[in-house]
Image: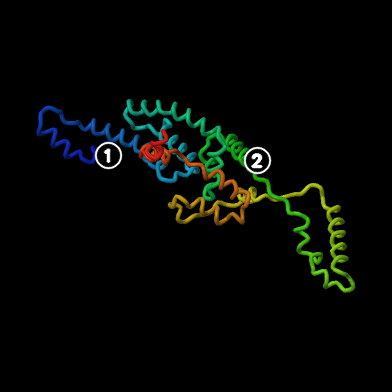
Amino acid sequence: MLNDGIQARAQINRFCAVQGEIPPFTNAEWERLSEIHKALKTFNDLTHLVSISRPQISLTVPIYYKLHDLLRDDALVGYDDDIANAIRAGMKKYQKYYDFMDNSEAYYTALMLDPQLKCDLILHEMVDQEAAQLIIWETRRMLHKRYPPLPQSISSSLSQTNLDSNPQSIPGLTQEDSLNRKTMRLWMLKKLQPQEYQFVSDIDQYFDSPRVTITGAEDPDWLCNWWRTHKGEYPQMAEAAREFLAIPASEVSVERLFSGGEIFWEFEGIV
């Protein structure tokens, strides 16, 4: 509404000049309206961003960072005092919801699942670098605990050896004798295997590799599609992506369903 009013400034001024009941707006009042519009536009744009049909949870943390850029004191230079004070009051509510977000592992994990960003946005935006490193460390630790790499069985590792050759190809041995020899060899090799295995998880490979450049990221499904394409390269991280990226950033789609009345009309007879 403010945007429409500002764009129609000339028409509104002419209307006020023709009739005598409403006094015309002064230049100072138009300037104040422009400042209010500038402040509210960011909120409006971000509201639309999380109101799309498939809002991505990986956008949540960047949205909080962008709001903080608007609400911090040095961003209010040049604003009218009343408008600046109103924006400062919004910081209290911002901090309340930021704390909710900050205490949930889902939002930071979803952000790090974006291969364009990984951990770098957190390191760039957070003033407290120790806190940023702690968030990254805790997230990686959680991922390692929840999505451990699966050990390769000894039988599968031996499948590449001549133990799996056709028993009948060994001269002088029946198939049963050859199978017994193979079983005995397998038992001996198992005995010699170390009790603890050292694995290089694809979780570390993902985080320790450089960020990637993505084309076509305007598609709301691009992130899920990227992980679908790279699930063979990062199986543990792809499993995390399947779980965390399935969480929507907002409940707008559910609210649309209820506001449309489809749920109530469908079950009207039951109620």
**Vertical side of 130 occupied by 52: above or below:** below
Q: Quadrant of the N terminus?
A: top left
**Residue drawn at (80%, 67%) of the image:** 162
The vertical placement of 185 against 113, above or below, is below
Q: Position of residue 103 (x, y in %)?
A: 55, 32
Tell which of 17 and 172 is nearer to you.
172
Neighbours of disc 1 within 10 Å: few (<14), some (14-19), many (20+): few
Q: Is residue 18 left or right of residue 225?
A: left
Q: Which residue is mark 1?
A: 3
Q: Position of residue 69 (x, y in %)?
A: 43, 36
Label placed on residue 209: none
Name the residue at 27% across, 33% down.
33
Q: Are marks 1 and 2 in contact (CB under 8 Å)?
A: no
Q: Nearer the viewer, residue 102 or 79?
A: 102
Residue type highlighted by circle 1: Asn
Q: Quadrant of residue 141?
A: top right
Distance (Cα) linking label 1 and label 2: 47 Å
Amino acid type shown at disc 2: Arg
Q: Residue furthest front?
A: 269
Residue receiving disc 2: 141
* Residue in front for this viewpoint, 113 or 170: 170
Is 103 situated left or right of 176 in this image?
left
Of mark 1 and mark 2, the one earlier in the sequence is 1
